[in-house]
Image (cartoon, rainbow, N blue to C red):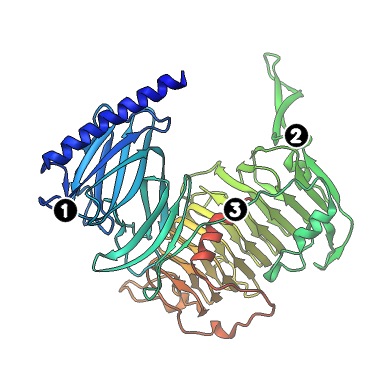
Amino acid sequence: MKTSLMTIAQMRLLAWLGVLSMLLAACSEKNVAGGTEAESTIALYVQMADGTPASMARVRILPDNYLSSGPAEEAWNETNEDGHVSFEVRNGRYTIEARNVSETEATGAVLSIALDAKADSKVDTIKLGELTSIEGYVVLGESPVVRVAGLDRYVVPDSTGHFVIDSLPQGSFDVQIGDPEEVHSTTVQSNAGDTLFVDGSDVASDIKVVKPEIATTTEYPESDWSAHEALLKQIQGYAVGTLGATGKTDSTGKIEKVEGEVCIVTTTEDLIDVVDSSKVDSLGNYGTKVALSQGSFRECAEKDTPVWILFEKDGTYNLRSPLRIKSDKTVDGRGRDIRITGMGGVTNESSNLIFENLTFTAPAITAHDTTSRRALSIHNRTHHVWVDHCTFEEYPLILVDVKRGSNAVTLSWNRFENAQSGILFGLEPDIYVDTAQTLTMHHNYFANMEARGVLARHGKLHAYNNFFYDVKQAGIECSDSASCYISNNAFNIETPVAVYRLENEDGTPDESTLGFVKMDGNMFGLGGEDLAGDANGYELDYMVLVEIPDAELAVRVRNESGPR
């Protein structure tokens, strides 16, 4: 059998070399890249991944320094039924791209070839493989063109700086930003499934490409209290001192260290309908009443004692009515995929709370009106609340609000997506004014916000190392005498910070809605700058480790925020 296969292979090679000889002798003007005075011939044998000939595959050859000036500039050639194709070219360096599309999949490959004066021909084989793409975010004042040298790829980033170069074979490519005369470039290694953050903010140096590490998922704590203690060590900002299930809040608001209990949620059921034998209609039919499902999330959250809430299994926990969670709780979704839907959670003079590794999504109320329930409402003098590594999405107006005298709150490593605004901090001045409200927010990601990332009214807000990627109106709106210290954030939006909430009829700012900001060290992509001000004298009374906002930080926040 081996002898027979070798004989067939030799026959194919002899036949192919004969074709090549005729091509060299003919010196045809067809398939010329670089002019009509062809000096060399490149003959290719294109194969599928399994080694079979790739008949009718598309092949294109371009100089390796070629930069496209628009979509689909250069034509493709096709291989014959045996997978063969040839090109006549001048001496130089070339990039050859081959593509094959079938009913079930598309494959491709790239080959670099150099021809010098001593070589008048080249025979090579290209084997097709899985396609991939490069996705990135260009952090520049204007959205430039993105090209791949040697390939006919021309991409204009969208208004947020986002771009995708698709249908690329796996390999190394020279990605360039800007005009062909003055390019800003870097070498990118593209592998299947890659998502790369491309930072072109410094025109004096090469583009920075960050390939994020795959975030490791957290393990289920298994009721190990040392895992709870390790969690507490991660709290920063105003919420420091929150103990969750290991603390008890007394009548004065003081939190003392205690030994809590573990409550494991064993069912995704919430409130259930049961038969009420005390109610019978004229036909003899029993009525129904609502009862609390045993082993439910609500049952654990409404206990009067300090409780560490763990979830037995992944699942969607649909709340049929707002969940009024009581004090001294740690709601811990680590090691699980916990999705809370329906009605949101609300605190009512309940404090010392931790929400970890949860997804709030698919609300029961989706109308754009003020009655819509937020995913999480922290209000009525609630204090010491830490919300960490959670996702909030799809609630129509506000995702999280902190209001009515609530303080000592930290929101960290959360995702706020697909809503009108992400965070409401404080109410309308004619409804409630409390300058004692305090909120720290760090390493949060904001995307697809129709209006604002954050609306602050009164109180003190400290925002650092957050990434505002896609927010239409303003990243942070600091208004109504709020004091906002905004430091070392990454803004890839047109209006990073606004200090007025309302305008007069003539379009001038309404001075009564003025907020006070202190800004330093922020990174701006599409526009904006650090505004002058001292936040009305606001100074931090705690220490935190603040990172430099750059491409690496932005991609880390984007990829590591939300449940881990």
Q: Amino acid at mark 1?
A: Gly
Instruction: Please give left or right for residue 270 compared with residue 159 in the image.
Output: right
Q: Secondary structure at mark 1?
A: loop
Q: Nearer the viewer, mark 2 or mark 1?
A: 1
The CA span between labels 2 and 1 is 75 Å
Which residue appears at 32% of the width and 59% of the height? 146
Q: Nearer the viewer, mark 3 or mark 1?
A: 1
Q: Secondary structure at mark 2?
A: loop
Q: CA distance from mark 3 to mark 1?
A: 51 Å
Q: Which residue is mark 3?
A: 562
Q: Residue furthest top?
A: 283
Q: Between disc 3 and disc 1, whose residue precedes? A: 1
Reading the image, the residue beneath label 1 is: 34
**SS category of the residue bearing label 3:** loop
Residue beneath the point at 54% across and 75% down: 487
Give the label on residue 430, or none.
none
